[in-house]
Amino acid sequence: MTTTPLRPRSEVRDLGLAAQGRQRIEWAGREMPVLRQIRERFATEKPLAGIRLVACCHVTTETAHLALALQAGGADALLIASNPLSTQDDVAASLVADHGIPVFALKGEDNDTYHRHVQIALDHRPNIIIDDGSDVTATLVQERSDQLSEIIGTTEETTTGIVRLRAMFRDGVLSFPAINVNDADTKHFFDNRYGTGQSTLDGIIRATNLLLAGKTLVIAGYGWCGKGVALRGRGMGANVIVTEIDPVRAIEAVMDGFRVMPMADAAAEGDLFVTVTGNKHVIRPEHFAAMKDGAIVCNSGHFDIEIDLKSLGEQATEVRDVRPFTQEYRLRSGKSVVVLGEGRLVNLAAAEGHPSAVMDMSFANQALACEYLVKNKGQLAPGLHSIPEAIDKDIARLKLASMGVQVDSLTSGQIEYMNSWTSGT
Ligand code: ADE
């Protein structure tokens, strides 16, 4: 007998999109073998039984597989969007209609709706929060002190969220453990670098149909995400300029073969600008003023604060939609600046986010981080915790096995050598 899951209270665009979402989720699953194995184990072991869980993530086909793994593990999971523009409405519909998972997420939701959904998530009285940018965790510590005793811990997906969690800990408000998923090797080496690298260009190209070959691409920030965008931009034939505030990263960029200069100089040279710094107002009025007519600016950092759009709006005499996710600001000087995805994450606003193959590892970390929190309930000190190395390496081994790649192992003599200090020159 087949049963249809009950439809939970949810806010999604259109449940009629569920069939399309189901098909796209199935397709993504082909590239997510590690998470699939975790889901299968979770289905028999139920490590999350009895756990109320909130996931604040970009609602994509990949997140659907995470949600299904959590559900298989026994969690009472509720999903909200981590960004107003990143939701895939068909995926949200399928999770509700096909799997009975409550979802509060609509592509294009306004900020009030976004914050209302954060409150709904907290009304679920979570024991575990999976956060992407730390909005739910920050709201919890500011507004729901009565719920703190129910929290086992949180897990954080992004660099931006980790920066916020460190600040919360410094200010003495992080009274529970937070697992730093972002810094797992199997997360940031692949998701931040190759995921952001590819999906950012994908978003730019889908929005504009721009030929990158021969264009000057200015990348603000040379962290793992910036490195990925620079690498892939060069691969597409762009002349890449990097701007940085960190001297070591600037040397890395120079030795990786990129020009490095301040934004004040790069502004006049760039055809296309991508911000990936995690900081605010990286592109400001003086930069807009110096840009070429028709320069394109976009952001692939977590929040929509990197480009000072308010000032750009103030300088503009007209703003018009020229293509989906593409707006042209006509400035008083007569020049125009083109903004993609309203300055929000261009890879999720105008494309589909990181490809499934990297999210497989990122979300394997998330699922296993939740299991780790439950197993170690009450034993982890408040503050940030790394993903245990054993989990990171297990994910890498599973991924390699799924790719059919084998690696060497140490001989006993090599193990002995690595553990000794007596034999030198
Ligand atoms: N962050 C970046 N890409 C993503 C994706 N495809 N799914 C969920 N979160 C993401």
Image (cartoon, helix red, strand yellow):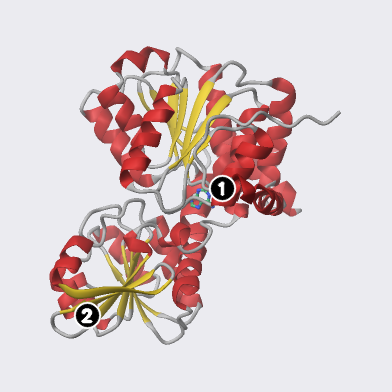
Q: Which of 289 and 175 is in front in this view?
A: 289
Query: Can residue 419 be seen?
Result: no
Total residue callouts: 2
| Place of residue 227 in the rendered image (x, y in percent of width and height, measured from the top left) | 41, 63
Could you say whether the residue bearing mark 1 is in a helix, strand or loop?
Answer: loop
Against 51, residue 40 (above or below) is: below
Q: Distance between the residues labelled 2 and 1?
A: 41 Å
Residue at 35% across, 48% down: 110
Q: Which of 56 and 197 is in front in this view?
A: 56
| Place of residue 329 in the rendered image (x, y in percent of width and height, measured from the top left) | 25, 74
Q: Which amino acid does label 1 sit on?
A: Asp
Q: Which of marks 2 and 1 is nearer the N terminus?
A: 1
Q: Which mark is residue 341?
A: none
The residue under label 2 is 291
286 displayed left or right of 404: left
Residue at 36% across, 41% down: 113
| Place of residue 219 in the rendered image (x, y in percent of width and height, measured from the top left) | 33, 68
The residue under label 1 is 14
Q: What residue type is labelled 2?
A: Met
Residue at 42% across, 18% down: 151
